[in-house]
Structure formats: structure tokens, C-alpha cells
Amino acid sequence: MVGAISFRRISMMAAGIAALVAWPFVFSTPFDLRMYGIAGIFAIMVLGYQFIFGHAGALALSQGAFFGLGAYVTGLMAVNWGAEFAITFPMSIVLAVALAALIALPVLRLSSHYFALATLGIGQVIALIAIEWVSLTGGANGLAGVPLPSIFGFTVARGWPLLILIWGFVAIGALLSWQIMRGFYGKACHVMREDEVVARSLGIDIDRMRFTMLLLSGAYGGAAGALYAHAIRIASPEALEFKTMLACLTMVVVGGRTRIGGAILGAILIVHLPEWFRFFDRAYLIFNSAILIALLAVAPEGIAGVIARLLPRPPSSHAKVIESVRGEEGTLPERRGLLLPSVTPILEVRNIVKTFGGVRALDDISIKLRRGAITAVIGPNGSGKTTLVNCITGVDTPDSGRILLADVDITGIRAHDVSSRGIARTFQNLRLIDDLSILDNVAVARFRAEHVTLRQALGSSIQDKAQARAYAHAQHLLHRLGVEDVDRLCGSLPYGVKRRVEIARALALDPMVILLDEPAAGLNESEQNDLAGRLQDIAADGIALLIIDHNMPFLQSLATYMICIDHGRLIAEGRPREIYQNPAVLEAYLGPRSAPLAAE
Amino acid sequence: MLQLTINTLALGAAYALVAMGFVLILNATNAVNFAHGALVMLGSYIAFTIGSLLPVVGLLLLPLLLIAAAIVGLLLYFIAYLPLKDKPVTSVFISTISAGVIFENAVLLIYGPEPRITPPVIGTSAFKIGDTVISEQSLAVIAAAAVLIVGQQLLFTRTRLGKQLRAAAQDPDIAAACGMNVGLMVALTFAIAAALAAAAGMFLSATYYASPTDGANYTMKAYIAVTIGGWGSIPGAVIGALLVALFEVVIPSLPALFPALMQAVPHAADLFTMTASTIALFIAFLIVLLFRPQGLFGETIKRRA
């Protein structure tokens, strides 16, 4: 799974490539070659679509627009100016990317419903413009007579030469996609797709990542469109029609959303389907759509996904990977205990107010966290505890008040910046990525520390060093928290282990402060004691802990300081023992005139 | 001016029916029904078919149309929603897109690509008030749509069934825990939404003709109306639909209203067409989204799924 590729996967890949090469020798009539060329073009389009739809998990319906634009750009330049392929092809890509950037501006921040519909609308508008702007685009008839690609004066003839050109680009596109996604960058994408909140809390800038994914989709779409114009010798509104987008969507769902083999398989199948099912005639789109719905219900991971599921999981080789970076910087967690103790607070919350509609969820709350201190926040349900965490972690922005981290104002900065500045958190309802291993889940938190970017991903050697260092780092932390057998998938872990994996993940951010949202929930007594010990150990390193919990016995032995909030107001603070006796706290929890809490 | 107002109201009333159904399904399933426009288109064709069998005015056909469309809505529920209701929401998006394609191509196979016209609600005559010509169809559409909108509101707010429908949409788990058949409620919502969409289809296609490929366009307009009006809000959807209609009626009639515009702007005849107004509407809408991602009157607290 990690780094090295298993023998079985190599043999699968070799068989797949052999089949792709053999295909045009077996089906070699001019018509077959043409169809195979079209399949290759769609494979490029689908490989691109996998970035935004598969890897980023956003249902964009704009891939048809990129494709159509690419076709029109090549068509216009080649027909009107007789421009060379060396100019038209890059221009098709550049303009499609520009369109993607333009689309991204208003719609990228939108959530799924809006995003799908807005991108669909942009496609519709471009199709309307192509039909209406007759003087430029030839209107509904399109631009006929697009020449075959001419490269440095040599015309690429139809048949084999064109086929080789197209599939050459498929190979380049596939390699590029593989290079970007196989390593750490792909892992971060996986986390973003599964859980945006977690991705942000790990310092992953998901807006930027999605933007990159959309631009990559645009580039591939433009390239495919350019080749399409050459292959069918016309740039027409047909390329922009929703049918094209739908074909692309069908291919990616049928083939598989994230696998390269899936893109190619899906494209070949869907391009040839109308030929194989010729007796369906005009009803084939109905047939096509019916298959799509059926597959969504039965095998949403697509054919490539089903094949991968049937094969056994390759044995992990992360031990070797970790060995390869032994001793390098970043492989060992820092010990912050070496820092001098200090009385100045590391995190200071000053008079923050947050209202939702008319409700004051936080009303003038001030808290100071010191290095190495374990501060507990208690309060009845709905008292504003979670809003407090959300404000500190940048999920919500307070209406007024300030939040200072090591004397730097971090009020209102974005969640992924908050975490990279040193505030980590765990989640009440355990948010691990179920289909990643324990090691992967923790290692992804090193994303920011390892400066992982698209460029880094493109330049990484076959052994992604950043990922290897992250694994080494993660393994240390997991070991410290007593989590072994780190290749297990997180989905199948018992509750108590998941808690500790989440804490390891928070530690992997090298935080100054960790916010723990109900860490003891669902743990039995011995697990709670074990956890308390580990948390004290972490605090002893100089990390400030803020624990939100209800569990009094757990907190009483653990917390050095305690704060009680109710209805958004801070009603008491002090040593845990004092808090339990405080009448205001008792009233908040148990109603007026109740027995002391300690009697429970 | 009066004529413009009535045209806007008539178009807006029909769009409101489309947008309302869109919101009903949205609230009940938490998913966008991309086939909603196709339901409008199917409504047109069903009305056309019934109308050619029973040559009476549209008003008398309406009950039959509503029933037939409700069955189509149930069909949509069973093919596109039920098998995928536990899958990620994008699966439902894709399946409704596919269902829309199925409807579109089925109609194309049966009726061919030629545009069809549906029977008018009462008649096609027009009368004059002063200088303005007012068509009977526009008034009848406004009245019929108003009755349907009010009927829908009464059903949802005053009846036990309506309360169950709303409960199932608001919190399916609690509704199920209270012993309601949530699946049935969602299915009924599809039926009601499809009936409203079909009525809109009949109203619209008496004036604008119907063709099998109209669906995507109607889906987009419902979407824009719903976004402007506030995601999930039924009164908002009606207001949004009226605004969309206003845009579409006013832009093509700008040259007539301000003859100076024809001289001032080059190619004015090309710029103020129905297509141009669709493009302008969408671009305006994207600009709104850029600055107010929550819609013009959109929700402030509720986070979008």
C-alpha cells in the first residue's frame, strides 16, 4: 500500500497496458481505429474529470464546457489562421484553464448543490453563446473543416498516426495524474474528500486544493477537446452539449472515480457501447442512463474499484519506507518540554462574543491557557462549549473580542491557518478517515510541516520523501500513545483506539495547544485512567490542553484549572475542587437548590 | 406597462409552480432533483397527448394531467431516489440527471423533436383595456397557478397529511420514530412536486411550445429562483420565480420600452433576445453568488449540506 508497488499490481498494470496496445491490432478497420481514437480522447477528458469529481469529491458539471472550449479554440485557430498544433493545442489548454479559474471565482466555495448547479449553468451559458455568436463560431452548424494536426509542418495522418498521437497524450496524462496523486498530496486530497472539517483542522487549505483540482480538470478537458476537434474535423455545439458532460460522468462512474485504469476502461466501454448495442438504436441513451443508475446502486466504486476490492490488499511495506529516512529532520516529534516554563499565557481568549441570530452563544468569555496546563471547560449542554472550540479553531469567527496565540492575534484567520500556527483539536464524534490506515490518518497531519504542494508532488521521486518522513513521525507518536499494528484501517478500530489515534493526529501538527472535545466519552474506567495518564504526559511536554467534558471524576484528577460556562457566560473558574462547590455551577447543572455535585 | 406586468405574473406563476416542486423535493430528500425540468417537459407532453385525445380546454384536462404527472413523480422516486437514498448525495444528483435523460429520450423517441403546443387553459382570445392587449391565457394561468399554490399551502399547513409531509422532510428520523412512514411521505412529495411541475408545463407550452430538450433549462430556472429566494423556502421560491420571470420579460422588451436603446447600442436586436436574457440572467446570478453566497434573501444560520 505504501510507496512500493506490489507484484500483483504490477502484473495487473502490465496486463492492462498490453490489452490497450493489442486492441487496435485486433480491431483494426479504419472505423475501429477511429472509435479507439475517440475513446482515447474521452479517456483524457475523464482523467481530468477525476481530479475534481473523484479526488476532490465535488460534482462539477463543467467538464463538458472545458472540452467544448478546447475544441472551439483549436477549431477557430486552425480554420481561420491555419495555426500549427504546437500553438493551438497549448492555447486550448490555457483557455480551458482560464475558464476554470473564472468559474472557480464565484462557485468554488459553494457546497455540493450549488456547485453542481452553478457549474451546469456555466456550461449551458457557453453552449448558448456558441450557438448564438454565429459570426465567430458558425452557430449551430459549427466550424467545419478543422484540419488534421500539423506538427512542425508534418501533418499527422488519420488512422494509426493520429491514434498514436492521441494515446500518447493519454499516456502522458495518466502518468501525470499518477505522479500527482500517488503520494502525500493524494492522501491529503483523500482526507479533504472524506471530511472537509478534518482536512481544515489538519492545516490543509482545501479551497486552494479544490482550485488546483478544478484547474487540472480544465487543462485535461481543454486538451481532450483540442484533439476531438482534430479527430472529428469539426468544432460544433455538440461538444458543448450536456450529452458530452453526461458521457464523461457516466465513464467516470462506470470505470471508477479515482483510478487511472478506471478512466481508460470507462472511456473505452462507453464509447463502444452504442456500437455493441446497436439494436438499441436511438434508445441507447436511455439504456446508458439506466446502467448508470444501476451501477450507482450496486457498485458505486466503479469497475476498477470492484477489481481492486476483489484483489487482496497488498502487504504494507512502510517499515522499509520509514527506515529510508531514519535520522532525517522532521522524522521525530519535537520535545517542547525543553522550552522554558513561562507565566505568560500561550493562548489567550479575550472577551469574545458570538451570536447566532438572536442567541448569544458566547457572551464575553475570557480564558488564559498556560504552557503545560490542563484546563477543563465544563457546562451544561448548549452552554456554548462547542462554539468556544469553533471560535478558537477558526471554524466560526467571533463577533467581537480577540484570540491571541503566543501574543499574536489570530482572531478570524481561517481554520487551516489556525491549525498550522499551533492549535490542534480532536473531535467529539471521532472523525477519522475510515478507509485510510491508522498510519495514514496520523501522517496526513504532517501536510503543512512537510510543505506539500502540487509542485512538490510533481517533483517527488518514486519514493515520496515527504511522505516517508511523515510516516516516521506518525509512527513515533502512535507508539507513544500505545497504538500498534498501524496498518489497520481506521474504520474497524475499537472506540478507545480511535480516541488515541485522534490525539496522535493532533500531536502530529506540532501544536502549542490541543483542544479536546469530550475525549473521555464512551471510554470505560480503565481506558479513562489510561487516557488521563497519556494526557498528563503530553502536557508535561509543555503543550497546553483544553478539555471539554462532562465527566467529573475524569476531570477532577486531570485538570489543573477549570472553567464553567452556562448560557454563553463564564460563571465560575478556579481549581476543580472549588468549582464543584460553587453554587452557581451547581445551579447551572442541577437547577436551583440542589444537593452538592460532589455527593454524586 | 400593464401588459408587461401581466406577462411577468403569468410567466412567474408558472415558474413558481416549478420552483415550489423543486423545493419540496429538496427539503424532503436533501438532494437536488436534476430531473425536475424534465418533469415540466413531460407535463407538457402529457397535456398535449390528453388534449389530442379529448379536445376540450386545458382547465378540464388539468385534473387528469395532475394525476398522470403524480404517477410519473412516483416513478421518478422509485428509479432515481429509492435505490440510492442511503448513498452519498451526489449519487442522487447523478441518478436524477440520468432519469432526466431517460425522460427526455423517451419523449424524443415517441414524439420526435418537433415542438408541440399544449391546449390553452380556457382560450386564446385577447381583449383590450385601453391600449393594452391582455391575453386570456395569461390571466387564466395566473388564476390557475394561484389556486394550485394556495392549494399546496393549505395542504401543507392545514391538513394532517401536510403536517406529516413536513415532519418527514424536517427530521426523517424523528418522524419515523413517531411511527410515520417516511418513505411513503417522500414518495408523495415526489408525486406532488411532479404534479405542480406538469401543470407549469401545460401552462408554459401553450405559449412557448414544448420540445423534449427543454428540461435542463427549466431545472436551471428553478434552481436560480430557489437560490435567490432562499434555499429551502417555499415563499422564497415563489418570489424568486417572479424575479426570474421579470428578468426574462423585461430584457427582451427593453428596446420596445426605450426605443433610444436601439440606436445607442450596436447590435441591439441581437442583445435583447430571449436567449440573451437567459445568459444575462445567469451571469447576473453568478455575480450575486460571488458577493452573497447565501442568496439574495438566503438563510443566515442554517449551513448548507
Image (cartoon, coloured by chain):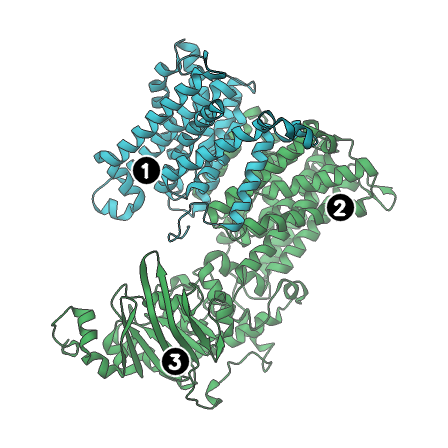
Chain colours: A green, B cyan
Residue A3 appears left or right of B140? right
Q: Which residue position is annotated with label 3? A: A369
Residue furthest out toward the right: A153
Q: Which mark is residue A89?
A: 2
Q: Is A477 located above or below residue B3 in the figure?
A: below
Q: Mark 3, residues whose alpha carbon is within 10 Å: few (<14), some, or many (≥20)?
A: many
Residue A559 visible in image = no
Residue A206 versus residue B235: which sits nearer the camera?
A: B235
Q: Which mark is residue B186?
A: 1
Instruction: Give me the residue at 34% from left, 75% from top.
Output: A547
Instruction: Give me the residue at 69% from left, 36% from top.
Output: A27
Quadrant placement of the C terminus of chain A: bottom left
Q: Mark 2, residues whose alpha carbon is within 10 Å: few (<14), some, or many (≥20)?
A: many
**SS at badge 3:** strand
Q: Could you tell me residue A575's position as x and y percent?
A: 27, 84
Say which chain tag 3 marks: A
Instruction: Give me the residue at 32% from left, 70% from top.
Output: A518
**SS at badge 1:** helix
Q: Nearer the viewer, mark 2 or mark 3?
A: 3
Residue A158 appears left or right of A183? right
Query: Residue type at mark 2?
Result: Phe
Task: Report how far apart the C-alphas of labels 1 and 2 lie in the structure.
Answer: 49 Å
Q: Is B111 located above or below residue A10 in the figure?
A: above
Q: Could you tell me residue B76's position as x and y percent?
A: 40, 32
**SS at badge 2:** helix
Q: Could you tell me residue A505's position as x and y percent?
A: 45, 71
